[in-house]
Amino acid sequence: MAMDALAERLRAASARYAPATGPDDLALFQYTSGTTRALPEAVRHTHRSVVTLMVAALYGVGLRAGDRYFCPSSPAWGHGLWHGTIAPLALGIAVGSYSGRFRPDRIVEALHAFGVTNLAAAPTVYRMLREAGVAGARRFAPEKLSFTGEPMDGRTWDFVEQTFGVPPCSMYGTTEVGVILVNYPGFEGFEVRRGALGKAAPGWDVAVVDDDGPLPPGKVGEIAVRRRGEWFRVKDRGHVDEDGYVFHAGRSDDVIISAGWTMSALEIEQALLAHPDVREAAVIGVADALRGQIPKAWVVAPGKGAGFVRELQEFVKDRLSKHEYPRAIELVEELPKTPAGKVDRKTLRDRAT
């Protein structure tokens, strides 16, 4: 009986749908927990946000009509939600999505079978492709590759360029403000600068600031975007070079001060990842009775034992400074991850506590 009533209502309904939404009407709530929060936070997005992200997708992912586009990020993460789903569909571009537990060989098969020309993924995906050794067996010919969510280490950058023939392009933003820095994948004449987050996306005024305002090139401060006449800090540190490229220097809360020395957890992580036997690494500051804090690293290095710890410490000392190395290293089988595939630093801090 209920089904008959429903069918009758459907027959009476108009075959045409006329949207009646304004740019400031609510479109969706996006929940973000990042890597440090204890509980998710709801961020309100309006329909204006969809248009803003369409622009960001044009410049940050390089989306164009005719692209065979694939983004394996889960829609539970901002990258998969906006750039993997909403923005490309709003631009009239079909998308491919990934279901189930991540398998590098399955990704490579999909890239080959569907002739993907534009791939956007987290650096973790590219690292897993590198470690699995499956990418070279069945090559695909991408025109554009992009990544977001965290910096890409040098070994993975080299792997991407050598394997796929194009440089990986960074795209950077936050849940609260959207994409603000891009490396313009596929833009003729634009230099993709190694290690940089890119330059300000069109429509944004981005700088590295301190309490007195924008800093000159080379000075480390907080990355900020101009909003409503004020500098809004996005809780990441960085510096800008002479040409306006912004470089990441770690989360603002990832600065480690040990016995008076200021250290960057990100720089120590990058040094660890340069070791050929290290698959993944994460560094945070932990309490120490003598030094206040020390850097502690969790390292994934299959097949390595306790003796490898000293080797790693010396390896990092040779690349940074004699005091800037992880005084504590724990070898683990895997790192805790958020649904977005980023290292879950809150879990590591809980473990350290």
Image (cartoon, rainbow, N blue to C red):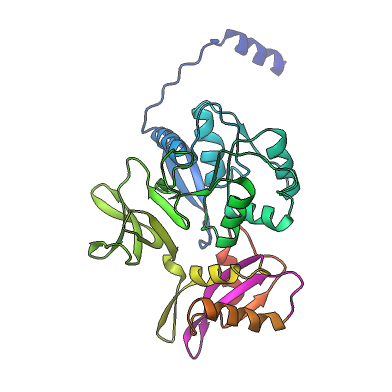
* Residue 280 counted in the magenta span: yes
**Which x, y percent locates residue 17?**
50, 15
**Which x, y percent locates residue 336?**
64, 63
Q: Residue at image x 52%, y 25%?
A: 92
Is residue 176 visible in this depiction of the protein?
Answer: yes
Residue 306 versus residue 228 in the image, above or below: below
* Secondary structure mostly taken by the magenta-highlighted segment of the chain: strand
* Closer to the camera in the image, 351 or 186: 186
Q: Is residue 158 left or right of residue 129?
A: left
**Which x, y percent locates residue 16?**
51, 12
Q: Which residues are magenta?
A: 279-305
Residue 44 versus residue 1 in the image, above or below: below
Q: Residue at image x 41%, y 25%?
A: 21
* Closer to the camera in the image, 7 or 28: 28
Tell me the quarter of the picture where residue 349 sits: bottom right
- Quadrant for the C terminus, please: bottom right
- Quadrant for the N terminus, please: top right
